[in-house]
Amino acid sequence: MGVVLVSVLSFLGVTRGGGAVAVAVLGAVGLLVFLTPSIIASERRVAHQGLIGVLNVVLGVTLVGWIAALALALRHSPRILAAGERGRDPSMFPAPRLDALDELGRRIVGVLGLRGARELLDVLTRSPENKAALIGRLYSRGDATWLAEVLTEIESDPDDLARIQLIEAIRRVAS
């Protein structure tokens, strides 16, 4: 930065005496004022510090851009970032909650056991012949006929969405 100031001062013809010091001090103060929005955002650890910095540096030369960056830096942030934490807001990524897929996965493991659920997962990702054989074996078990019916319904799904959801349910529990 010192090299830039010396170059500017030299260009302006101010190279000696108190004038050079005054211009250097004014330049440093001007730079500090120019970067105030970025400094405030960093000190307050608000979310979107990078956006504020880019807005400040790129559009800060216009009064509107500088005021917008300052407003973003001073606005109430719903979450202050911890030291060293990036601007990713965990509320955007909620903790997984138990849902119908988890319940289905647990029910499958309850009937087939973990080994059987893994086998089912393997079969669901294989050929239609393997699926047909498994469905036949499940129909022969009294406690698994519901699962055989579910698999039969899944095979008739033209979009294959039900099979994908069933695979996800089993993976959640059996993996």
Image (cartoon, rainbow, N blue to C red):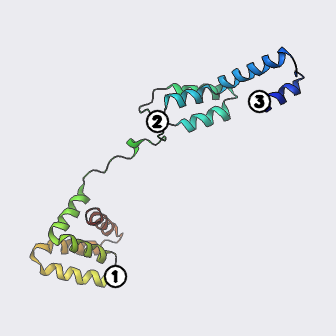
Say which mark, if any, is on residue 83.
2
> For the residue labelled by badge 3, is the local secondary structure a helix, a strand or a loop?
helix
Q: Amino acid at mark 2?
A: Ala
**Which image quarter: residue 109?**
bottom left
Q: Is residue 160 visible?
A: yes
Q: Amino acid at mark 3?
A: Gly
Q: Residue at x 31, y 71 (%)?
A: 157
Residue for badge 1: 127
Q: Residue at x 24, y 72 (%)?
A: 153
Which tag, 2 or 1, sits closer to the chain's start?
A: 2
**Which image quarter: residue 16?**
top right
Percent position (x, y) of residue 77? 45, 30
**How much space separates mark 3 and mark 1, taking CA atoms?**
71 Å
In the displayed structure, would residue 88 be above or below residue 17? below
Q: Nearer the viewer, mark 2 or mark 1?
A: 2
Observer-nearest residue: 26 or 168? Answer: 26
Quadrant the N terminus occupies: top right
**How much space separates mark 2 and mark 3, taking CA atoms?**
30 Å
> For the residue labelled by badge 2, is the local secondary structure a helix, a strand or a loop?
loop
Residue for badge 3: 2
